[in-house]
Image (cartoon, coloured by chain):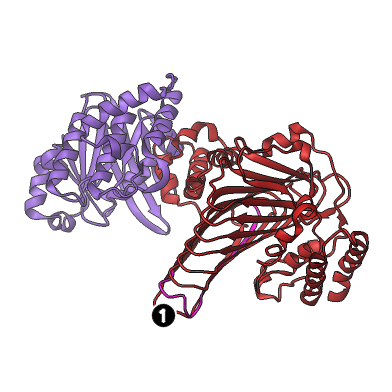
Amino acid sequence: MGKTMLEIRDLHARVGEREILKGVDLTVEAGDVHAIMGPNGSGKSTLAHVLAGRPGYTVTQGQVLYKGRDLLAMSAEERAREGVFLAFQYPVEIPGVSNVYFLKAALNAVRKHRGEPELDAMDFLALVKEKSKVVDIDESLVKRPVNEGFSGGEKKRNEIFQMAILDPALAILDETDSGLDIDALKSVAAGVNQLRSADRAMVVVTHYQRLLDYIVPDFVHVLIDGRIAQSGGKELAHQLEAKGYTWLEEAPAR
Amino acid sequence: MTVAAETDVYRALFERRQATLRGTEPAWLSGLRQEAMERFEAMGFPTTRDEAWKYTSVAPIVRTAFEPAARGRFDGRSLAPFRLRGAREIVFVNGHHVPELSRGGSDGVVVMGLREALDREADRLQRHLGRQLGESATAFAWLNTALFDDGAVVAIPPGQAAAEPVHLLYCSTADGPPAVAHPRTLILAGARSQAAVVETWAGADGSAYFTNAVSEAVVEDGAVLDHYALQREGGAALHVAALFARQGRASRFSDQSVTLGAAFHRRDVDAVFAAEGGECALDGLFVAGGRQHMDTHTRIDHAHPHCSSRELYKGVLDGKARGVFHGTILVRKDAQKTDAMQTNKNLLLSAEALVQSTPALQIFADDVKCKHGSTTGQLDPAALFYLRSRGIGEEAARALLTYAFASDVVGRIRLEPIRAGVTAFLQSRLPQAGEIREALA
């Protein structure tokens, strides 16, 4: 396997007064796809947001290393520039801000950070053309204000499109399947699969096994009450599909 | 100090002026001024006990002994930022017409100084000047009527489309003791005519001068008049303005205001549908920071059936700024099939900024469509995080969202040089605007 991309050690986090993560341990190597499953309220989305640096989430204990560096010490924008990408469960509509130009500003912020030259409009539009094919997104959609008036499927597709443009080293997909019909799900998953590579790690957060039929993970972890209760290969997802989460919830956490 | 004493200063000034002007102004105008002075005295300066002035204290105006503004000099260079490219322009400095700074036009549209128009064709003005001030006219509007020295007259002949926008540029030098000017504008849009008229009130950052402006627009049957009100006064200025528009049958009128300057701003927009089938659109953007106070009052009088009105006002407030929006829509008993919509949205960028928003719908007809909405809030934290999660820095993300908030009002401005000017201003107020300029949809 490749080098270690992400190392989460005994992570505790709270939202407001409520402790949500109660000691998460997880190691992700480059090239691997890890699925995090779990019932509602188990802390899946919290974990995704803590990794992306969302304000309002307080880490009370533990450590997260990204490429060997302290991820938690970085601001949200620094993390993005270092190659961390969160595909949102609920992408935000931003009227008045053009999707394509916002993305150009974002990409150039990333490139500047890496010491690479900024892309001009021509090169950027060529990139947009290329990547919009990867995720099968309508180019006209790309030019509209960010997510404004997009359908649920279009929003998710736009997330994967942004990911394709920004080319992250670590992609966290937060319930990318929620609200999608089967056709949209297949097409979004196909986009994600095209972005799998030996240099990139992915953490796929999902409630349902269905998504994992299309994005086949290397590892599956079950998060229950803020801890990883079980880890295994892709067959664990099928077990969960058949048996639900209760058999794990009843077992002692460790 | 009693109310009488506060207005006494202006009465004395009025008497002196009337004595000087005796014989030079037509009798009807002297009569109008006399009546206006009496109304001003009867009303007195408003206090915060008056409903329409509940959130706006005029104490800074009342307690200052303003001198009538003397002629001043404005060199071409300091005037340049306020000029409007591609427009026919008439320039006033400290309220006085300066022909050598003005630029003529090529069509039959009449643009001249009010003083000059009074000398040349006073009788034509008699039917209109001061006649649009209705029941809601403020004490300040009457004070202007009693004391105005100069201003502009724009007349678009019936059936004519103006070839270029008309720009009325009122500048103040703000040098010297606090001075007051009462600029007066009269726009006569003949039947089926079409024109864009821009008024700019601008000034240097200097003394606390007072601009008390009144504009009247008569929009005859089938005319289309786009009016713009750009307030770019100096930082210490006190700016009070009123616009009275009277619309004929199937006419279209719009007023788009952009309010950026002055320490104190109050504007009253009063639009009356005087016949059926008219359309009226009032839009406004105000951007206030520091301790700026900006108050907009609108009143649309649906006096006749089948008229539609649209209002979109947006405010961006930072620092300890105060904003007020009050929008009255009056639908009279016979004004069936009225279609009115009013929206006010405010963005607070600091915890100490404050805004008061009051929609006031008075509906006496029963077959109408009237809607209003008002929201006040801060930048959406979810949107902020979304942008940051893509690598956009926090400051740039805030700037981007602030600009985006204002963008729909800016987008409605049809005159490109104004739109570009407002865009440039907003970008100059936003940090790191360079990085995000392209992302502004």
Question: Disc 1 marks which amino acid?
Answer: Asp
User: Does B337 appear in magenta?
Assistant: yes
How far across and down, in percent of the image, does residue A133 sit?
22, 30
Vertical arrangement, residue B392 with respect to residue B366, above or below: above
Q: Is residue B288 visible?
A: no
Label 1 packing within 10 angstroms: few (<14), some (14-19), many (20+): some
Q: Is residue A139 part of the magenta span, yes or no? A: no
Is residue B76 visible to the viewer in this orientation of the structure? yes
Question: Which quadrant holds the C terminus of chain B?
Answer: top left
The chain displayed red equals B
Quadrant for the N terminus of chain B, please. bottom right
Camera-side residue: A209 or B71?
B71
Q: Nearer the viewer, residue B187 or A191?
A: B187
**Res B38 quadrant in image:** bottom right
Residue B62 screen position, x and y as percent: 82, 65
User: Which residue, as the protein is rendered here, is positioned at the far left?
Assistant: A242
Q: Which residue is mark 1?
A: B366
Chain identifier matching the purple colour in the rendered picture: A
Give me the residue at 58% from left, 40% from top.
B164
Q: Residue at x 60, y 35 (%)?
A: B86
Question: Magenta residues, as a range?
Answer: B318-340
